[in-house]
Image (cartoon, grey):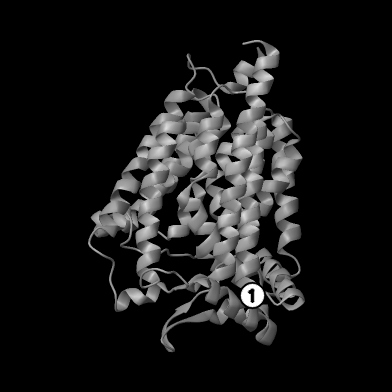
């Protein structure tokens, strides 16, 4: 294709991706503006109130309560890294300045993070033939619209920083800057530590790996202050001691007795996959897709917002595989949120409504389909980006 024709085609494709991303962004803002969201937003509001009233140490010791019709259902442990407290202070300040609720600003930041991730992925793949179709699927993902626009948690912000780290490393950008992005990602939730071996190996040279680690450490240390100094041992114990909800997904749904073992199997398989994928696949995005897909497949528990972890990496699997997975994930999450919200129109989705209104019979089986399709993403990403010989990407770059 002539260079001028290629540039014109790339321009049209870029505008189409931008239009779809903008439409999804507006849909998320509308959901954020006209709904309360899920009980996670109520939890974050209570975290903010308790932080202001009793301080950081009490918040991490006591946590907050979860309620249904005013009745306390359980104690919600504060297990977020301390940087989330800084975000809560920022969102509360915006609430006071504008009159719009904290939950709106939280979900607005998630929507902005999604646009940021799409822009990064476009920058990385704009010269790759056909990649725009998969990016279009990612930009329009129904699951992404529901998680960022309705659910109300920090997962989309977290994964956007992980995408930034991966894109910088794959584009041979500054490794220290990739480390800063990854450090911020880990400061929002600790799950991205699962991707650390993949990104560390993806830095390729000893010097770049050292810069990446240094950037990660500096960002994480700065983000934790001043909160971490108040109770370092307590905060570490709380953030690392997290047990997700069981019974909604995969192994915990099909084989509850295997849940405890699956936790250790998941981490071991992800480490092995990171090492093998580094040697046998050519794309860092594909390696992140493989590791994240395996982790979610073997995960001992599940929250619907966890699907935000895999959404951007589905780009590496190609548009067909990505579209199949995104459609299935969207249907599953619609069933979950619709049940929590007691049907349309959605306003407040309280997961504790399940005590009185269980999931319809089709919802959890549809989750099994989505869970199974993770293997399609893993296999497609690996196959599309496999190397022709058993040489590491480090060797390829040195030749």
Q: In what quadrant of the picture does the N terminus appear?
A: top right
Query: In the shown orientation, is residue 140 left or right of residue 363?
Result: right
> For this rendering, which residue is in front, 56 or 362?
362
Across and down, in percent, residue 306 comes to 47, 55
> For this rendering, which residue is in front, 91 or 207?
91
Q: Which residue is mark 1?
A: 101
Across and down, in percent, residue 389 comes to 48, 14
Query: In the shown orientation, is residue 188 left or right of residue 272?
Result: right
* Residue 154 in sight in this render: no
> For this rendering, which residue is in front, 241 or 114?
114
Q: In what quadrant of the picture does the C terminus appear?
A: top right
> For this rendering, which residue is in front, 326 or 192?
326
Across and down, in percent, residue 122 comes to 63, 34
Q: Residue at x 60, y 60 (%)?
A: 29
* Residue 293 in sight in this render: yes
Quadrant in the rendering for residue 103: bottom right
Quadrant in the rendering for residue 45: bottom right
Q: Is residue 36 above or below residue 361?
A: below
Secondary structure beneath label 1: loop
Q: Residue at x 51, y 54 (%)?
A: 145
Q: Residue at x 38, y 70 (%)?
A: 340
């Amino acid at each position: 294709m002539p260079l001028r024709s290629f540039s014109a085609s790339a321009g049209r494709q870029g505008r189409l991706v931008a239009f779809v991303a903008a439409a999804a962004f507006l849909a998320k803002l509308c959901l954020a503006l006209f709904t309360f969201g899920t009980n996670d937003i109520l939890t974050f509001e209570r975290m903010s109130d308790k932080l202001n009233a009793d301080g950081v140490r009490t918040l991490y010791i006591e946590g907050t309560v979860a309620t249904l019709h005013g009745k306390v259902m359980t104690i919600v442990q504060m297990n977020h890294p301390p940087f989330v407290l800084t975000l809560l202070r920022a969102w509360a300040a915006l609430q006071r300045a504008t009159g719009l609720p904290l939950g709106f600003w939280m979900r607005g930041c998630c929507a902005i993070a999604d646009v940021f991730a799409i822009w990064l992925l476009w920058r990385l793949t704009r010269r790759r033939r056909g990649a725009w179709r998969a990016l279009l699927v990612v930009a329009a993902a129904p699951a992404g619209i529901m998680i960022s626009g309705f659910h109300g948690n920090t997962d989309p912000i977290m994964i956007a920083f992980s995408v930034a780290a991966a894109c910088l490393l794959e584009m041979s950008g500054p490794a220290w800057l990739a480390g800063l992005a990854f450090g911020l990602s880990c400061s929002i939730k600790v799950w991205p530590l699962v991707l650390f071996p993949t990104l560390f190996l993806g830095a390729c040279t000893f010097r770049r790996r050292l810069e990446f680690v240094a950037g990660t450490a500096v960002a994480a240390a700065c983000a934790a202050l001043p909160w971490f100094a108040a109770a370092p041992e307590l905060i570490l114990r709380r953030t690392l001691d997290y047990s997700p909800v069981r019974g909604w997904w995969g192994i915990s749904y099909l084989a509850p007795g295997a849940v405890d073992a699956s936790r250790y199997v998941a981490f071991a398989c992800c480490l092995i996959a990171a090492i093998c994928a580094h040697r046998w696949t050519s794309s860092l995005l594909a390696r992140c897709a493989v590791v994240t897909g395996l982790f979610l497949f073997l995960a001992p528990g599940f929250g619907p917002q966890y699907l935000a972890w895999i959404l951007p990496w589905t780009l590496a699997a190609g548009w067909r595989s990505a579209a199949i997975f995104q459609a299935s994930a969207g249907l599953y999450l619609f069933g979950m949120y619709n049940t929590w919200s007691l049907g349309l129109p959605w306003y407040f989705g309280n997961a504790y409504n399940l005590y009185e209104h269980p999931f319809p019979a089709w919802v959890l089986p549809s989750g099994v389909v989505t869970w199974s399709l993770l293997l399609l993403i893993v296999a497609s990403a690996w196959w599309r980006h496999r190397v022709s010989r058993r040489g590491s990407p480090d060797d390829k770059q040195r030749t």
